[in-house]
Structures are given as structure tokens and as C-alpha cells.
Amino acid sequence: IRAGWLDKNPPQGSYIYQKRWVRLDADYLRYFDSEKDTYSKRLIPVSSIFGVASIGDQKFEVITNKRNFVFRAESDADRNEWIRTLQQIAEERKSKAPDRTLMSSSADSATEPADKSGFLELRGFKHKLFVVVAGDKVFLYKNAEDYRLGIGITYIEMNVGNVKEVDRRSFDLTTPYRIFSFSADSEQEKEEWVEAMQQSIAEALSTLEVAERIWAVESNRLCADCGSPKPDWASINLCVVICKRCAGEHRGLGPGITKVRSLKMDRKVWTEELIELFQQFGNTMANQFWAANVPPSEAISPTSGSQERRRFLIAKYREGKYRHYHPLFGNQEELDRALCVAVTTSDLAETQALLFCGASVTCDTGDPQCPTPLALAERSGQRLQMEFLLHNKTSGWFGGCCGAGWSSGGLPSALLCRSEFSRRWCTLQDGVLSYYENDRNAVPNGEIRVEEIVCLVNNPLHAHGAWHGCSGRRGWIESTFEVYTEAERLYLFGLESPDSAREWLKSIAKSFVHPCAEELLALDFQRLGRLHYKGGLTLERAQEGWFALAGSTLHVCSEDGRQQEPLQLRKLQELCECPCPAGGTPWMGRTRCPPNPAPGCTGRTLYIQGERKLDFLGWVHAIQKAAGSSGDTLSEQQLTESDVPLLVDRCIDYITQCGMGLTSEGIYRKSGQNSKTTSLLEVLQRDARRIRLKEGEHQVDDVANTLKRFFRDLGDGLFTRRWAPDWLWATALEDEEAKLGEYRQLLAALPPVNRATLKALINHLFRVQCFSGENQMNTHNLAIVFGPTLFQTDGKDYKAGRVVEDLISNYVEIFNVALTASCPQQVNDREMKKQQDEITAIMKMREASSSGTQQAGDFICTVYLEEKKTETEQHVKIPATMTAEELTFEILDRRKIVMKEKDYWSCFEVNEREEAERPLHYSEKVL
Ligand SMILES: [Zn+2]
């Protein structure tokens, strides 16, 4: 709008005016060293200017919220012209946003909310700059205060930018005019900056044209999966518009299931036909099929986490769990025939339902002139049908190398014929499972060679009930089982009774399971098959093994017939799914199991590797499910190695470790926030393994109440319905010794999980009353609270409190003596000593941190140097952000150890048995 040379008033202390090239456009007033410069020395957003005044001597002043800028023109005429233009522009800006107040005009002076902001070093500047990535620009500010005011140094338009990593902490932002060399504080920080800037470049180069046309249909303006607004990604074969976060999870499903493209960046893929297809289809039509039966408890929202998203998307698109089943489902020939008809009409919804219920895109149409559905659609002039078929051509539903759908068969004992299942006569002979049209046919419709079978699954009763309801008739099929083959095909068989299904399963299993794994056949397995895995000492080579899942136990037999200790999945420390690095196998799963007690067995971490997607995903799901809590009794929870529910362990740990826990006044008596307690209990019950309670995020009283609520609602109670009356009765014994003896006997009678949990809880309460001076909760007070909770008596029976009081007061006598059989008395003393030491250490740390240096979320950990001895022990306060590298340096520093050139120090995680368990990557967070 206006540009010219002006003198800028000098910085404080100096009288010499500086000559600056000043430029004004619709958004910014900027000044430069020279007219050739691209990057300004200063930028003032027009929106933050609220006054311009003449101050004599050819000078004028630009007034912003906090700071004024004085310029001197060459003549009065020039000065007046600047003032007039500036006033006009500022006025226009104000009228455009009349509701904008003085304060907010400075607050939103950065044109867009920041995608990323923070301090970075920039070569050539003494101090760190405050850098903001916003939309398609990167802004530089002297400090955070300037950013708030909107007064910046310059901005960099990213359409000409290019980001390149230089070393661990540095990266260059290159433009044709200048190279900006930035350094971040850490490698992770650097990576985040690089990613943010790359996103910004992508955004600068993107186009809105496609997105706007697709958003013209209202249902496309919210993510089809989670409901986030303005979704700018899409799955082009499923025809859904999705948000960025869901798009990330879609990619994890693989292109065989969903092909993810950006509405803004992948310009080439968006042909006229594809855009029209999305307009016709819309998220509504897609969800009428894919999300016809989503239980509210499984649906996701814009705020859902990535795990939750993935689980939902796998269920939705890979398993088709919420589908609206087509009435022909299960009948391949009918499905194919119907597809050939549908593609010649404009009924895209029908084509969608047929295709994703198993119709084959490449089926034989029986018409020599148009041998494929695609050719049929073309002849009928159905452009959108063609487009839809094309994008689904290579995907073929359910794993499809060959566009295979489900094959289904009835077994010989089948009595009735259902339209969903085709009844087939099956035989299992000489290693071949064949199915025939009927028992008189000599030529089979299909065959499965048993050596090609990789997995058998016994489905729970009525697992496939959905499609009976769908067609409105009750089915004869009570039980189903699945057979997976190497060619990634899945065959579903249905039978009228669970017994006959099991019989068939056993026969098939016997014929394909290697003799070395025969013992697995005796199990009542839900899932049996072969998988590759690494474990124990043979980490470098994956071997094939036979796996059987029965209840929450995973049995593994190696190829040489050596059976591994069965894995108790509820006791896993960690269960994670990691995508395999480039090449090789498609998936890899990792389960970390507790150390194996049997000598010679070293299986600590078990990596299960999928050679094929279809059956492996089923395994991952089944293992995840089996590793979770299954009910409301103690033994159905996820457990620690010492048989204490993880939930209990997490809560006790938090209260012991967090800053105010043990000393918090009225702990366990004060009530927390009801809604927080409810939701915390719910997430912990769902998967305690994933939850880390953190200071700042959780309140002590909420956690304490969660623990109480858990015991109050526990199925069968901590003392069990069978034994609780005996415990209450024992309080009446007058002779103290006789009473304690009775308690010990009753303790021994409890199931192991209840016994271990009671011990852990009373141990914790014992510690709590050690602090009664501060928390006001002495043994009696704790007993009043916990008696009715543990006995679930609603306070009607005073004896409940008596039991708890006795247990806390006589903790050492009752619990330790009960264990003397395996543990000599000294060990018990040592255990008590260790606890006292820990309490002291915690107290010390707390005093040290009362100065306010401790951050929320800090945890106090014990760290050993080189070997596990008391002398090498250090108690370190670990913030949530601390990496293994930082911790290592901290320890070395404390111990005054100087790093020599060839020294390598690593940080190892130590397990509950205090054995080194796993090295941490240096950039990994310790907590
Ligand atoms: Zn979404």
C-alpha cells in the first residue's frame, strides 16, 4: 500500500536516527534495512495499531497497546501522507472487526493460533528467539511478551521454505533469500519443530479447492469416525471424509483396507469422478453401512486417544463389527450375482453393502463381452460405480490377495439350509478338508489343505448372531469357528451345537498341529495356531512356535517341542503392538512377561511376529482382550507379579509417592470428587496397565476414594463371602494370642490373590498411620473407614472395624509370621527396615522439595549405579519429561564420575524383583 524511506527513532540512549525502508500492507507495518530485504527487522500488525499521531519536526508516532514507534519523514508532506494512510488502514481494519476490543486486538495479532511455539536459538542472534509456527508462516519474536503483544521481528512465508535436519539438535530452514539455522534444546524438540515446519510448508502449498467442494455436502464437514470438524483427509476406497488423527490410524490398517489421501495435498488423485462420488456418497451413506450398530460405549469422539481410535477403526473397517449386514451375506454366488446387477444402476449404497459383505470385485459375470463388474458398469454408463469399483479393485475385503470373501460351509451334521450359510458336506481326509455341494457329489466345491492352515478360532456362542437378527429369522447356527490359511483367507463354519463345533475343531487341530505341540490339543483353547516369535536368549532369530490361548493364559510350544512356561496374560507388565520397521514382516507384537521362575528359562520379553495380517490381527485382539480385566472379583483383575491387582498397586504407589499423599490430612476419610472417582475407577478397571497416576493430574483424595470404592464394590469382597463371618466372629475372642492365631489361620484360608491384596493394603495402612501426626488418621480412624468398606457392611457391624484395627496394629505378627514357612524371621525384619528406610527417604525428598522446586508429575525413584547395593543407591526425583540420557548424566554428575571417551553408560529398567530388565533408549522418557 505504501513504502518509502523513513528515519526510525533510535533505541534508548542514542540520538542517531536510523534510516529504514518502511513498508505497509493490509496486514503489517514492517521496516527493513534496505528495500531489497525480504525479512524485516520489525513487524507491527495493523490490527494492533490503534492510533497515529503527528508529533512535530516531521515526526509521527504509531501507537500500539503497549509500545509506541516514532518515525521521521523527509518532509511534512511525506509525513502527513504516512499518517493519513496509516489511519485509514487502521480504521478499515477496525470496522471489519467492530466487536474486537482493545485488549483482544493485541491478543490475536498473530494472525492465526500457533501450531507450535517456543524458544529456539537462531544463528546470528545473541538470545533465544520466540518462534511461532502458524498456518503457512513462521513468525520470529524477541520474546514471549512480544508475541503476546503481536510485535514481531519478521515472518517467513513457508511456500518458499525447505527444512533440513543438520545434526541432533539443529536444523536449517532454507529460503531463496536466507538460511535460518535453528537449534532446539533437545533432539525431540528439534523433531517436533521440523515436523511442525514441514506441515506448515505442506499447508502453504495446499489447495482448498477440493476440500471445499467435498465439504459442500453437510455430512462431510465432520469426521466420519470421530466427529471432529473440518476433516481434511479421506479414505478414497471407503468413501469417508476423516480428520487428521483418524487418518493416521487408518494408515495403520494398511492400504488393503483403506486408502488414505489428503483433500488438500494429494491434488492428483482427486479426479472429477472421485469428487462427485464423495459428494453423492457422503459420510452419511458410508456410516449407514459401516456404523449401523455402534454401541455408545465403543464410539469415539474428537478427544479420543490414539489407542482407542485404533481399536474402534479396526473393529469398524477391518472386522466390520458394526456393519449393516447385507441379507445375502455368506452366500458368495448370490452376492456376486447381486453385485453384477447393482453396478448397472445408480444404487451406490447397494454396491457398497455387497462389496463389503464379501462380493468379489473381480467375480465372473458370465457375460463374455463384459467379464467383470467394472465392464458392466462401463457399458451402463455408471461413471461413479466405475470409480468406486476401481478404488476397491485391489483391496478385496478381508485380507484379500485375490479379492477373497468369506467362504462358509455347513458341516455334515447340519440339518437345515440357511440363506446366510450355504450348507456344505465336509470331509477331513488325508490332510485335506474338502467341502461338497452335497454328500453325493464326488467333486468338491473347495478344499483346504491342512498344512496351509495357520490358525483355528473357536468363536463364543452366538458370536455371529448379528446376521440372524438382520434377516429377521432365528438361525439354526449356534456355534461358529474360523479357519485361517496362509493365503490370508478366512473360512467360517457354522454348526448347530457347541459340542459338534468343538469336535470338528479338535479333529482339524490334530491334523495340522505339529506332534511336538501335541499337549496344546488337550487345552480348551479359544485360539490355536502357529506364529513366529522371539524370546529368551534367541532374540536374533525368530522361530516358529505353536500358540494356544485358553482363558487368560497363553501357551507356547517352540518348534523343537520345548514347551515354555505358560504366560499369565493378566500379569503382563506391558503389552504393546509395534509396527515393524521397513520391509519384512507386516506386524510385530511385543509382550513383556514377568521373569520366569523356572531355572534355565529366560523368557522375559516375548515378541510375537505376524507373517500374515489376517490371523495376526486376530491374535493381537484376543491377547489384548485376555490381558484385560474380565470381571469384578479380585482374581479377574490385571495383577502384579505378587498377585496384587494392578489397580490397587497403582493407587497405593501414588499415595505413597506423591508429594502430599501420606501426610494429607484426613486421607481416606475425606471424600474426593465423586465424578472423578467414578471415571478414575472406570479407566483403571478397563486397563490399569496403561494408566500412570500423576501428581497434578490426579488429586490424593480422588485416588484414595477410588481405592475404597474398588474394595466396596468388589465382587465377593476382599474377605470373601465364605470367610467374612469367621473373621468377624474372631474379634470376640478375648485371649489376644488365640485371636491372632485365628486371624493367621483365616488368612491362610483365603485365595492367594485375596491374601496378597490384604497384605499389601494393610501394609499400606500401617504406613499411613505412621504419619498420623500429620494426617490425623491413626489406626482407629483408618479402621472406622476401612472396616465397612472391606466387609461391605454399610457400617452396620462394628466388628468390621475391629478386624481392620487388629490387622493394622498386629501387622508384623499376623502377616509376616504367616509367611515364615518360606521366609526366615530376619528377612521379615529386613523388609520392615527397608520400608522404614523408604519412608525416611520419601520424607527427606519431601522436605527438599517443599521449597517449591518440584514439578507436578515428579516421581521419586531409586536408581542404582552399576550394581544393586544399598551403597550405590540414589533417590532421584524424576520429572515426567526426563529422558534416560538426562537421568544418566544426573547420576554420573552426582557421583562425580567423569565420562571418558569410550565409556558408554546406559539406563536399565529394573523389574519388581530388582533385576535389570530392559535398556532404555537414551531419548526415551524414564517414567
Ligand atoms: Zn476423526
Image: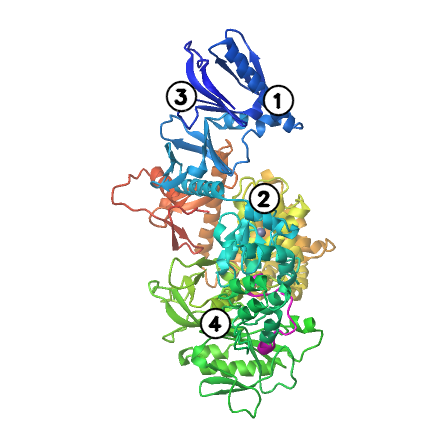
**Which of the two labelled residues, at mark 1 and mark 3, occupies the earlier sequence position?**
3
User: Which residue corresponds to the image point at 71% horizontal and 76% vertical from the top-left?
Assistant: 473
Is 5 magenta? The answer is: no
Residue 420: horizontal and vertical position, in percent? 63, 77
Checking the image for residue 698, the label placed there is 2
Where does label 3 land, which residue?
Answer: 33
629 lies left or right of 829:
right
The residues bearing labels 1 and 3 have C-alpha atoms spaced at a distance of: 28 Å
Tell me where residue 803 sits by quadrant.
Answer: bottom right
Of badges 3 and 2, the one in the foreground is 3
Amino acid type, residue under disc 1 in the picture? Glu
Q: Is residue 672 above or below residue 739?
A: above
User: Which residue corresponds to the image point at 64% horizontal and 86% vertical from the top-left?
Assistant: 415
| Circle 1 crowding by C-alpha within 10 Å: few under 14, some 14–19, many from 20 | some
Q: Is residue 645 above or below residue 840?
A: below
**Which of the two labelled residues, at mark 1 and mark 2, occupies the earlier sequence position?**
1
Where does label 1 land, which residue?
Answer: 91
Tell me where residue 110 sits by quadrant.
Answer: top right
Q: For this rendering, which residue is in front, 413 or 632?
A: 413
**Which of the two labelled residues, at mark 3 and mark 2, occupies the earlier sequence position?**
3
**Which of the two labelled residues, at mark 1 and mark 4, occupies the earlier sequence position?**
1
Which secondary structure lies at badge 4? loop
**Which of the two labelled residues, at mark 4 and mark 3, occupies the earlier sequence position?**
3
Q: Which range is magenta?
A: 316-334
The residues bearing labels 1 and 4 have C-alpha atoms spaced at a distance of: 67 Å
Where does label 4 land, which residue?
Answer: 402
The residues bearing labels 2 and 4 have C-alpha atoms spaced at a distance of: 52 Å
* Disc 3 + disc 2, Cβ < 8 Å: no
Residue 140: horizontal and vertical position, in percent? 45, 30
Q: For this rendering, which residue is in front, 902 or 714?
A: 902
